Structure formats: C-alpha cells, structure tokens
Image (cartoon, rainbow, N blue to C red):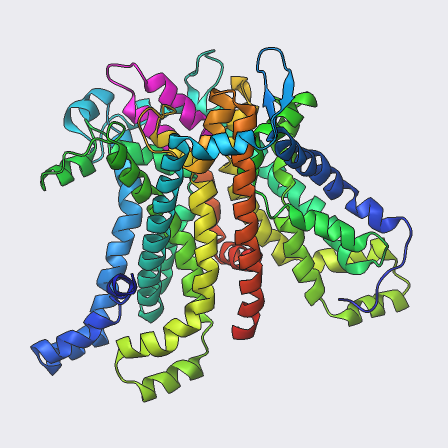
Amino acid sequence: MHKAQFQSPLYPYLLLLPQMAIVAVFFLWPSAEAVRSSFFLQDPFFGNETFVGIDNYTDAVTRSDYGRAAWFTFLFTVVVTFFSLGIALLLAVAADNVLRGQGPYKTLLMWVYAIAPPVAGLIGIMLFDQHIGPIVDFVALFGWDMRVGVDYWDTGIAMMIVATWKQIPVNFIFFLSGLQSIPKGVREAASIDNPSPSGRFWTIIFPLLAPTSFFLMIINITYAFFETFGIVDVMLKGEPGNNPVTLVYKVFLDGFRGNDLGGSSAQSVILMVFVLALTIIQFRLIERRVHYT
Amino acid sequence: MSQDQIAVTGKPAVPVARPASATGAGFGAFVRRHQIVEHIVLLFGVLLMMGPIAVAFTTSTHDPVTIHSEGMQLGFGDNFLPTYEAVIFEQTGFTKQVTGWGMSLNSLILGLGFAIGKIIVSMLAAYAIVYFRFPLGTLCFWVIFSTLLLPLEVRILPSYEVVQGLGLLNSYTGLILPLIASATGTFFFRQFFKSVPNELLEAARIDGAGPFRFFWDILVPLSRTMIAAIFIIMFVVGWNQYLWPILMTTDESFYTVVRGIRQILQVWIGADIPDYNEALGLAIIAMIPPVLIVIIFQRMFIKGLVESEK
C-alpha cells in the first residue's frame, strides 16, 4: 500500500459512488434475492409466496434431470479443459520453438478468441448438420451415424468439440507468454544439462509452466461452466428436448421456461457455492504464483 | 490420466528427437535445423483454428439451394453480394424492423458503452481505494471484490427482475449497467496504481497538486497503455454478450448482432430450405469488428489479457 495517501472526508466516497451504486443495485440486491427466493415456493399466477425451507434444494437435487445435467456438466468440463489445455500447450511449445514465422502463427492461432461463443455455436451446428455438415459426412466414413440434435451423446460430443475449439486461443496466449517469460539463461543451462528436447521439456520447462497451468485450469473450468451458455443455447437451437444441457443452462431453462423461480434460485445458489470454492482456490494459487515468477 | 496427458502434450518434443535415430543423422539434422516438426504442428493448428471460419465464409457466398443439396462449400460462390446485402440491409425478425446494420450499431453501442463505462467507473473506484485513507475503505474494497465471486450467469433471474422493476428492460442503460457491476476492471487498475512509485505522489503534493490534479495530470497519462489494453478486452467482451441481451431485449430494435444469431435460428425452424447462407453471413458480420480489433491491436490485447486475468 501507498504510504503517502490523501486525506479527505468526501472525495473517496464520491469516487466510489458510481461503482458502489452499480454493485449494490445490480449485484448485491439480485444475489440476496436469489438466496431469499430459493427458500420460497412462488405461485407464478397470483404472485403468492410460501416459505418452504430447503425443499427447493432437495427437489432440485433429487430430480433425475438434475443428476443427468450435473453428470454431463462434469464430463463436458473435464473434456473441454483437458483437450483445450493439451492442444494449446502443444501449439504454444511449437510456436515458442520456431524461429521463422512466429508472428503470423501467433496471430492466426489467437484470433478465434474474439469470436462470441454463440457465433462459434452457429458455425458448429452447420458443420455438424445432418444435411450439409462435412463433419457428419466425414465420420460416416468410419461408420458413425452422427445425429446431432437427436442423439444425446452425439449432441454432447459436438458441443464439447466446439467449446474446446473456442477455448484454445486463450490457453495458447497464456502458455506462450508463460513460455516466453522463462529466462534465456535457464533454457541454455537446461540444454547443456539435458540434450534431449523432450527430456528438457518435462524436467525443466513443464514444471516452470505449472503455475500457469493450474491457473488456466481454474479459468477453463469457469469457462466450461458459465461462458459456454451461448454455445449450448445455439447448438440446441433453443429446443433442449432430449439433448444434454449444462447446469447453468438448466438454471435458465427452469427459471424462464419452466417458471420455477424457487427451483431455479436454489440451483443458482448451489452454483454460487461452487464458484465461491473455485475462486478461493484460484486466489490461493495466485498467491503461490507470485513466488514462481 | 497422466499417460494420456503425456501422449497429448508430449508431441512437440518427442518426434523431434526420433527421426535422427531412425533415418540417419543427415535427415534428422535437416528436420531439426528447419524445425519441420514444429511447423507441421503449427500448420495443423492453423488449419484447426481457421478451417471452420474459412468454410463458414465460403459457404455463405453460395445460395441456399446449393448448400442444401451439396453441403457446405469450400470454393467461393457467386452469391456473395446477394447474401451480404440481405444480411446487412434486409429487414428481418418477426416485426420486420431490424436489419444487420441496425443490430451492428446496437452491438457497437453495447461494446463501447460497456468498455468506456467500465474504465471510468473502475478507475475512479481504484483511485479511491489505493490513494485515500478513509474509514469504510476496506469494507468497500471487499464488497467490490465479492462481485468477482458470482458471475451474472448464476443470478440471471433475480437480475432480470431488478432491471424489470426499475423499468430498464429494452433500454441501453439496462443492457450496459448490470454488466459493469463485475469488478475485473477495478482490480486491474488497483494493481496498476499500486505499482506506480510513491515518489510521484510525494512530488506532486510538494508541488501543491490536490487529488483531482494528481489523478488527471499524472495518473491518467501514466495509465494510457493500460487503459488502451483494457479497452480492447472490454470492447470484445461487451460486443460478444449473449445471455444478458437475450433476457433484456424483447424489442427487436434493441437486438445486438450476437443476439440476432439466436433470432436467425428461430426463423430457421420450420423452413424447408433454411437460409444457411444468411445465417453464416450474420455470423461473419458478428465476428468482424472484435476480430479486427484484436488483430490490429494484438500486442496491447495480449498485454491486457495476461495482465487483467492475473
């Protein structure tokens, strides 16, 4: 903290006023409302409310479609995180090694970052379309009759592929900047010690990247949970039917389509607790990261 | 799990070493000197990342009947002008009031409003937190901090009700303000202000500069690159908003391009031959502004991304 600071009875409050007002109205109030309404049963027609304790929670969690969505979200998160990190690391290591053309490669590999998830989803459903999709034609060569939008797992796999694709650039940028922040001296020392590039990678470079990887893992889990909403929504064409949904998408469905305010709020609160836990882990890791870099 | 990981992530290094022993020192040395393996990996990466966009674009230049009967197209078609003319200027949607151009303007307002609003609000707040000592300072800091814990997605329904209660549905204010509530920008500027040397403030105070002078004449000019970097990130984030505009805007004249993507799907359902070309055309239109910004200001963008996520 700064030792020399201003003293003023009024200034700091004036400066904080816009931020605090926005936070209070659009964050604190709705969050409190979510927690409150998760304990009530609402009547959508008359607006009556009955206090039901934790019934909304037990109802939400014990319903079979919740269990199904939770399981899908788990698999979705694991697959998307694992493959987008893996492919991005592979590309970042290659880009870090090449002497020529690094600039163009970097640009071409990172700009998909700027594409909105639903836009990626739209291109995805075209590529996986029953009539016009080249990917469906391709996998048909191997005898896989892929029916995205009809078959539960085919749709799920298509969503995972699009979500992974969309997340590669962010991971690539962080891995590459992590690799490039490793001092030249360390690399030179490593190459004298260990002439095999693969050995060098696993013994020296990869451990040095570990903090970046942990940090990215949290970022990716958050992405798979929340930011994939647009991909899921577009790839289902707004019609979930017998298709897989993520937990966040289910909050939206139950709240806006099903008019189940209490149930939707209870699911929100469960997700809040989850994000809270993730964020605490993230901040602990950031503290540790300081020591590495 | 760990073996899989090695199989996936170990690729860059392993093949470089192998050819040398397999096919003799000459070829191996050649492969290594010219980094052939690295280039092959990168070219595959480029194909993976660019391929879908390229196919989306070339397909959008064909007419729907061709696409419907022959699938997505790799070659450039002769329907480029009609497709994009329709996407940009033709009135679409249920009320026939909205064009691609109009939606792009809404996206621009959302992107700019979000980025500029966020920068102003968060710079002021960060300035108060870092440069002033006042009783409620720590409390305010933790309240702002708490917004990082809960993304909008987990409190959509109550947020919607609050905005509805305030009468802000179908308005730019209702679209932009709730998105500014997250404190990422405040944290970014707080980190930066804390790295500014103390001596600057001491010198400014000796010269008789008050809080306002110091902020405007010293801190803002010092933060120029940071402001630019965060602006680029926030513009892209704002332009790409999807969930919030879906909830907030029922009036089609407030639709953003990304919101329009959902609309085009609704029109699609029930059509014999959907306008694939127009759907893809809208996708291309939706990605051009943020992509251009990211490519043109690449260096600043990477700086903003890596610094703000820390």
Query: Which stretch is magenta?
Result: B257-283
Q: Which residue lies furthest to the bottom in this view?
A: A192
> In the image, is B97 to the left or to the right of B83?
right
Q: Position of residue B142 (x, y in %)?
A: 71, 52
Residue A248 highlighted magenta (yes or no): no
Q: Nearer the viewer, residue B19 or B8?
A: B8
Q: Position of residue A176 (x, y in %)?
A: 41, 64
Is residue B242 in view?
no
Q: Nearer the viewer, residue A113 or A43?
A: A43
Is most of the magenta stretch helix, strand or loop? helix
Where's the N terminus of chain B, which quadrant? bottom left
Q: In this picture, is B230 found above or below A95? A: above
Is residue B237 in view?
yes
Count every numbered label the image shows and give the total. 0
Q: Measuring 36% from the left and 41% from the top, which residue is drawn there?
A: A71
Q: In this picture, is B290 found above or below B65? A: below
Q: Measuring 39% from the left and 53% from the top, which residue is drawn there?
A: A169
Q: Position of residue B103 (x, y in %)?
A: 49, 26
Q: In this picture, is A18 found above or below B304? A: above
> In the image, is A163 to the left or to the right of B303?
left
Where's the C terminus of chain B, which quadrant? bottom right
Residue B261 highlighted magenta (yes or no): yes
- Which of the 4 image quadrants contains residue B72? top left
Q: Measuring 32% from the left and 39% from the top, which residue is drawn there?
A: A159
Q: Where is residue B260 in the image (x, y as percent from the top left)?
A: 44, 25
> In the image, is A84 to the left or to the right of B230?
left
Q: Which of A100 and A113 is in front in this view?
A: A113
Q: Measuring 19% from the left and 23% from the top, which residue is drawn there?
A: B68
- Which of the 4 image quadrants contains residue A27? top right
